[in-house]
Amino acid sequence: MDEKKDEKQQVNFNIDPNKTPVYFTDGYLISSNEHAVTFSFAQAVNDGSQQNIIARVAMPLPQAKAFLATLNDHLEKFER
């Protein structure tokens, strides 16, 4: 068995804070079809009766499932 196939590839992420804003979101919509899951993130305006979509992210179904597993793992570790 090739050991290289069993190792996870390390990926480095670079964030430029001047080009990558952080948005607070207090609402979201999730939609999907047979090809992708789309997350729409929103902020409440006025008295909260209206939500403005501020960002949308779409990913293929397998990636969305992996994202869910990673998010769940992260939250469980954070809550300890």
Image: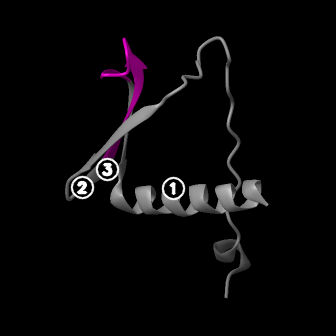
Q: Of the residues under marks 1 and 2, which one precedes in the sequence?
A: 2
Binning the other alpha carbons within 10 Å of mark 2 as few (below 14), some (14 to 19) or many (20 upward) gives few
Please tell me whether mark 2 or mark 3 is closer to you in this view.
3
User: Which region shows up in magenta?
Assistant: 38-53
Q: Secondary structure at mark 3?
A: strand
Q: Of the residues under marks 3 and 1, which one precedes in the sequence?
A: 3
Q: Amino acid at mark 2?
A: His
Q: Say which residue appears at 44% left-offset and 62% top-offset.
A: 65
- Label 2: which residue? 35
Q: Which mark is residue 67?
A: 1
- Label 3: which residue? 37
Label 2 to label 3: alpha-carbon separation: 7 Å
* 53 sits left or right of 25 in the view: left
Q: Say which residue appears at 58% left-offset and 55% top-offset.
A: 71
Q: Classify residue 45 by image quadrant.
A: top left
Secondary structure mainly formed by the magenta segment: strand
